[in-house]
Amino acid sequence: MREAMADITEAPEWTALAEHQAALAGRNLRELFAGDPGRVERMTVTAGDLCLDYSKHRATEETLRLLVALAERAGLRDRIAAMFSGEHINVSEDRAVLHTALRLPPGEALTVDGQDVAADVHAVLDEMSRFAERVRSGEWTGFSGKPITTVVNIGIGGSDLGPAMAYEALHDYADAGISCRFVSNIDPADILGKLAGLDAEQTLFVISSKTFGTLETLTNAKVARQWLIDALGDAKAVSRHFVAVSTNAERVAEFGIDTDNMFGFWDWVGGRYSFDGAIGLSLMIAIGGEGFREMLAGFRAIDEHFRTAPFEANMPVLMGLLGVWYTDFFGAQTRAVLPYSQRLARFPAYLQQLTMESNGKSVRADGAPVVAQTGEIFWGEPGTNGQHAFYQLLHQGTRLVPADFIGFAEPFEDRAGMHDLLTANLLAQTSALAFGKTADEIAAEGTPAAVVPHKVMPGNRPTSTILVPKLTPKTLGELVALYEHIVFVEGTIWGIDSFDQWGVELGKVMAQDLAPALTSEEPPTDAPDASTAALVRRYRELRGRRV
Ligand SMILES: O=P(O)(O)OC[C@H]1O[C@](O)(CO)[C@@H](O)[C@@H]1O
C-alpha cells in the first residue's frame, strides 16, 4: 500500500490561487500591460538558445509568486532531484525515469540500481555512431553490395513520432545523401505507400520497438521482410537490410534479426522519451553522429537549466505552472502549439504523445482519484496554415485556448521576403490575440453599426512566444527537453505518475481477441458487447464472409 498523498487542492497555496484568479478574472491584458512598463522585460526568460516571452499571459507577478509557492508545496524541487538521480518515480511500474541520462556528457558518472547507467548510454551511442558512419560512408552495403540510400524506420508511438518529427525538422542536415521514411500504422496503405518506388538493394529497415511485441510494428516488419526477399530473391539478404532497436534481445532474435545488429536501451527510458537514444538511429544515420550529439547537447542545456534555475526564472517550470493555471483555475481544456516552421509540422503530433500519454490520468501516483483536472489536450498546425483554418475560434470563439507560438529568426532558405512575412504573421497573431480590437475602435473605422459586434476582437487570449535563433539539432533538442520537463512539472502538481500508460493496454488486447472473429470464415462467436457484435456481423457481410 502506497502512502496516501496530500490533496493539493486543500493546500493554502491552491486556495490563494483560486482567490487570486477571481480577482484577476475581470482584468484584461490591455490593462495589465498599460499599468506595468517593466512587464515584458520581467516576463521574458532565456534557457539555452530559447527565449520565452510570457508577458501575454493572464498573470501578474503575484500570480507567478503563488504558482511558484504551489510548486514548492507539491515538492517539485525534490521531485526534480529524484528524477535526475534515478529514484523509482514511475511507481506503477517500479522503474527509474532516466531519459535525462541519455544525454549525460561523456565522463559524467551515474550509477542507478547498481548499474553504471552513464557508461551504458555512451556504449550504445558509440555503437550507433559507428554503425551510422558505416552506412553513411557506404562501407555498410546491402546484400548486392550497393550502398544504402534510404532508411525505413518501422515503429509506432514513441518508436516513430520522435524520429519522424526530428527527421522532418532536421532533414536539411542530412548530408550523406541518405533519406528516411517512417512506417507506423497497421493500415497497409502506410507501408505500401512508403515502400513504393524504393530500391530494395539500397534500403535499410530499422525495426524500432521497445518491447518488440507491438502488433503494428511486427506486422509491418514482416511485410517489409517479405517485400525485401521477393525483390532480392534470397532470405539471406535480410541480415544486411534489417537492424533492430529494442530492449528485448530475445524477441529481436526470434524475429530473425542478428542481435549483433541490435541497438539497445533500457526500461528506465519511456517510449515517448526515447528518440535521443537508440530510437533515434534512423535520424543519426541521416544527420550523422556529430549532428546527433549536438542535439543531445541541446537537451542537456535545458536539463541543466531545469535542474538549477530558480523557479521564477525556470522556463519549463513557468510554462508548466501556467499550464496548471489555465487548466485548473480557468477551466481551459486544450493548449495549441503553433510552430511557425513548416519543418516542425509533426511537432504537435509528437507532443500529443509526450504530453497526453504522460498526463492523461485520472488516478494519482498513490492510486487515489485525482483531485484536479489533469492532462491538457495538445493540438496544433504549423503557421500560417492554422491561421486560415482554426484561428477564427482562437480569436472570437467562446473557449479559452492558451497557445504556444514558436518562431525562428534565421531561415534555411528565403524567397521574396517570405520568412519575414512568416514571422510578421506570428507576431501579429499573438498581439491580436492578446489585445484584440474594441467596438469603439472598429466603429471609428466607419464600420456599419450592425457589423461592429461581429468584428469585435475580444483579446485577452493568452500566448507564450518562444523565439529561437535557428532550427538546428541543438535547438530542436532544447525544444523537446523543454516540453518533456513541462510535462513533469504539471504531473508533479497533479500528483500523477507521468511515466506509465496503462490506458492503452485494454484496447490492444481486445483487438487481438477480435481479429479472429473478423478474419474467420466460420460464423462469428463471442463479441464483447451487443454493439460490437452487430458491427462484426456487418463487417463480415461487407467482406463477403459468413454471418
Ligand atoms: O516501442 P514499442 O514497445 O513498440 O511501443 C510503441 C508505443 O506503444 C505504446 O506502448 C502505446 O501503445 C507507447 O507508449 C509506445 O511508445
Image: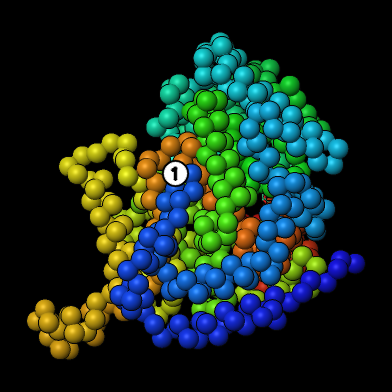
What x and y, as percent, mark residue 133?
Answer: 56, 18
Q: Horizontally, is 323 left or right of 365 in the view?
A: left
Q: Give me the residue at 80% from left, 58% from top.
A: 92
Kind of residue sitting beneath label 1: Asp
Q: Which residue is mark 1?
A: 49
Can see residue 397? Answer: yes
What x and y, as percent, mark residue 244?
Answer: 68, 30
Name above or below for residue 3 compared with residue 331.
Answer: above
Q: Nearer the viewer, residue 252 or 125?
A: 125
Judge the density around disc 1: few (<14), some (14-19), many (≥20) Cα neighbours within 10 Å.
some
Q: Where the N terminus falls, by quadrant?
A: bottom right
Q: Quadrant of residue 33?
A: bottom left
Q: Quadrant of residue 230?
A: top right
Q: Give me the residue at 45% from left, 21% from top.
A: 176
What x and y, as percent, mark residue 358?
Answer: 65, 58
Q: Nearer the viewer, residue 441 or 14?
A: 14
Name above or below for residue 135 compared with residue 487.
Answer: above
Residue at the limit of the structure toward the right, as seen here: 1
Disc 1 within 8 angstroms of ligand 1 (CB): no
Q: Nearer the viewer, residue 297 or 384?
A: 297
Q: Give me the residue at 43% from left, 77% from top.
A: 399
Q: Secondary structure at mark 1?
A: loop
Q: Where the C terminus falls, by quadrant?
A: bottom right
Q: Give me the residue at 68% from left, 28% from top.
A: 107
